[in-house]
Image: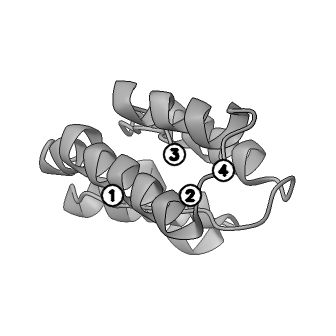
Amino acid sequence: MAEFVQNYWRLRTTSDKLAIRYLEHSMSLFITFEGGEGSGKSLQTRALQRKLNRLGIPVVLVHEPGSTPLGERLTRLLKWAQNTNISPLTEVILFNTSRAQLLDEIVRPALKAGKI
């Protein structure tokens, strides 16, 4: 950690600076990547996860909808169900159901444990 702190201003990437702040303050972070389909969110999240893991920082990677057993079932229903006429309101409710489960089951416990 001391080496990171000494070289803080010479670091060029945001992930390096993020790692230093984490190591200095042992804080939890909730990071989201937003963008349309095919915009590279998965690629960028996996790259950040690998970088932080190499620095010894615990990372939990999740996706929406999904990442929980309930979320995966809802994903199959929302994305792959054929001949299902789901109303827009029902779709919003199902996405929010998946999100609430994800927060309760994975995100909040990870943040309490000091993970990113």
Q: Is label 2 in contact with label 1 (beta carbons under 8 Å)?
A: no
- The chosen color scheme is one colour
Which one is in front in this view, the residue at disc 4 or the one at disc 2? 4
Q: Is residue 60 above or below residue 1?
A: above
Marked residue nearer the N-terminal end (1 or 3): 1
Which one is in front in this view, the residue at disc 1 or the one at disc 3? 3
Q: Position of residue 45 (x, y in %)?
A: 64, 47
In this view, which residue lies farthest toward the right?
A: 38
- For label 2, the residue is 16
- For label 4, the residue is 85
Q: Amino acid at mark 4?
A: Asn
- Is the residue marked by circle 4 packed among few (<14), some (14-19), or many (20+) residues within 10 Å? few
Marked residue nearer the N-terminal end (2 or 3): 2
Q: Is residue 21 above or below residue 46?
A: below
- Separation of residues labelled 2 and 1 (CA atoms): 10 Å
- Is the residue marked by circle 3 packed among few (<14), some (14-19), or many (20+) residues within 10 Å? many
Q: Which structural element holds mark 4?
A: loop
Side of 109 relative to 75 (left or right): left
Q: Position of residue 48 (x, y in %)?
A: 61, 47
- For label 3, the residue is 65
Q: Is label 2 in contact with label 3 (beta carbons under 8 Å)?
A: no
Marked residue nearer the N-terminal end (2 or 1): 2
Marked residue nearer the N-terminal end (4 or 2): 2
Q: Is label 4 in contact with label 2 (beta carbons under 8 Å)?
A: no
- For label 1, the residue is 22
Marked residue nearer the N-terminal end (3 or 4): 3
- Separation of residues labelled 2 and 3 (CA atoms): 29 Å
